[in-house]
Image: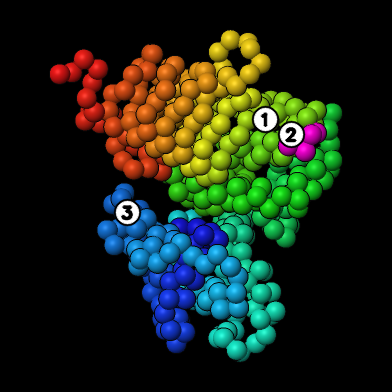
Amino acid sequence: MRPVLPSDLRAAAGVLLAAPEAEWPALAAQLVWQSDTADRYRKRLGKAHPRFGTGSLLAASLARGAPPGPAFMTDRVKCALVVVLQALLSRAGQRDFTRGGSRLSAVKCDRICPGDRPMTQLKHNISTVDPVWERICEEAQTAIRAEPLMGGLIHSGILHHASFERALAYRISLKLASGEMSEQILREIADAAFAADPDLGAAARADLAAVFDRDPACHRLMQPLLYFKGYQAIQSYRLGHWLWQQGRKDLAYFIQMRVSEMFGVDIHPAARIGRGIMVDHAHSIVIGETAVVGDNVSMLHSVTLGGTGKEDDDRHPKIGNGVMIGAGAKVLGNIRVGNCSRIAAGSVVLEEVPPCTTVAGVPARIVGSAGCDQPSISMDQILHEDFPQAGDS
């Protein structure tokens, strides 16, 4: 099944809360089985399962008509979450459902039902379970067994750390360190940022899931963290953006400079970028100061979100949610690219792009629909000529 995120757990808990407590274990096991089945269906046929969705626990839960999940952590919600976690861990012990061959951590957990133990202890159990990080660690151990020569790198980059955020802070500091700024100083800055702003870790996890889901070359969650410069560049930008928001602009500029030098990605720290971002290959990416990028956006190498002129004002593009930007595309000026649209490779976009359309050419023109509801997730770059062309009767 796909990586388990907090939104998945909340949605599954919402399904359980609508049923009698006696049915919770069986219902949770059924949800996990359905999401696992849907994920294998999606990987085999390249499309969502007709009943259970895309393979996430969230999709399987929403397929049952349940709300996205409870808004408040009441005692009953905590119990429901524990039952869902137990179902995930039990399923992990039955079969391998990752592309890389490792399993979700089978952490031993006693059977917990409402009233079995104090709620303070339930809260502790929930807060210490991190399926994404557990899975990364298991993938790391599997990788070391397969290639012992990678042991030092993988231990220092993953297994030596207590959390995903600490490992990411270490990786960023290792990549951006130079004779002008030591790795230790950068790591202290990154650790402080992740501790002060949990949204940084949440965004990094969403980006990780996006890369794993959309990049067919990504077979394990540990790959972007260790090897993919697009993922590392975006997380480094997020650190620089956090510094910019704290008023530490010179340090933010230093981060921008090092990201450009190390990864070939130049993102101004004042730019605003959403979550679930996938930057494939990531060579020669340029994103300007007043640019805005929405959630769940995918872009390939050599993309420019640039300005026009030299006025010091709002001069860069505004990219909507779910947009896919092809390799070498240039979007110039303070223009809006609508949600769930596609920009074909090599295009130069100078005018507004309506939602759910495909534009191509120099200068870019509308050539069809987006082809699907979520082009940034499907990554389909084939033009669909079903949209009326300019001049058609």
Magenta-tinted stretch: 244-248
- Earlier residue among tags 3 and 1: 3
- Report the quarter where the N terminus lies: bottom left
> Is residue 368 visible in this depiction of the protein?
yes
Rendering coords of residue 33 (x, y %): 38, 70
- The amino acid type, in three-letter code, at marker 3 is Ala
Residue 76 placement, left or right of 187: left
- Report the quarter where the C terminus lies: top left
Question: Residue at image x 57%, y 59%?
Answer: 132
- Earlier residue among tags 2 and 3: 3
Q: Which mark is residue 255?
A: none
Kindly identify which residue carries mark 3: 48
- The amino acid type, in three-letter code, at marker 1 is Ala
Label 2 Cα neighbours within 10 Å, binned few <14 / some 14-19 / many ≥20: some
- The amino acid type, in three-letter code, at marker 2 is Trp
Could you say whether the residue bearing mark 1 is in a helix, strand or loop? loop
Kindly identify which residue carries mark 1: 270
Picture quarter containing residue 252? top right
- Rounded to the nearest angstrom, the CA distance separating label 3 from label 1 is 37 Å
Residues at discs 1 and 2 in contact (Cβ within 8 Å):
yes
When the figure is inspected, residue 125 is found, relative to residue 191, above or below; the finding is below
Rendering coords of residue 211 (x, y %): 50, 45
Judged from this view, the residue extending furthest toward the bottom is 116
Question: Residue at image x 28%, y 24%?
Answer: 367
When the figure is inspected, residue 28 is found, relative to residue 368, above or below; the finding is below
Which of these two is toward me, 302 or 373?
A: 373
Question: Residue at image x 80%, y 43%?
Answer: 189
Could you say whether the residue bearing mark 3 is in a helix, strand or loop? loop
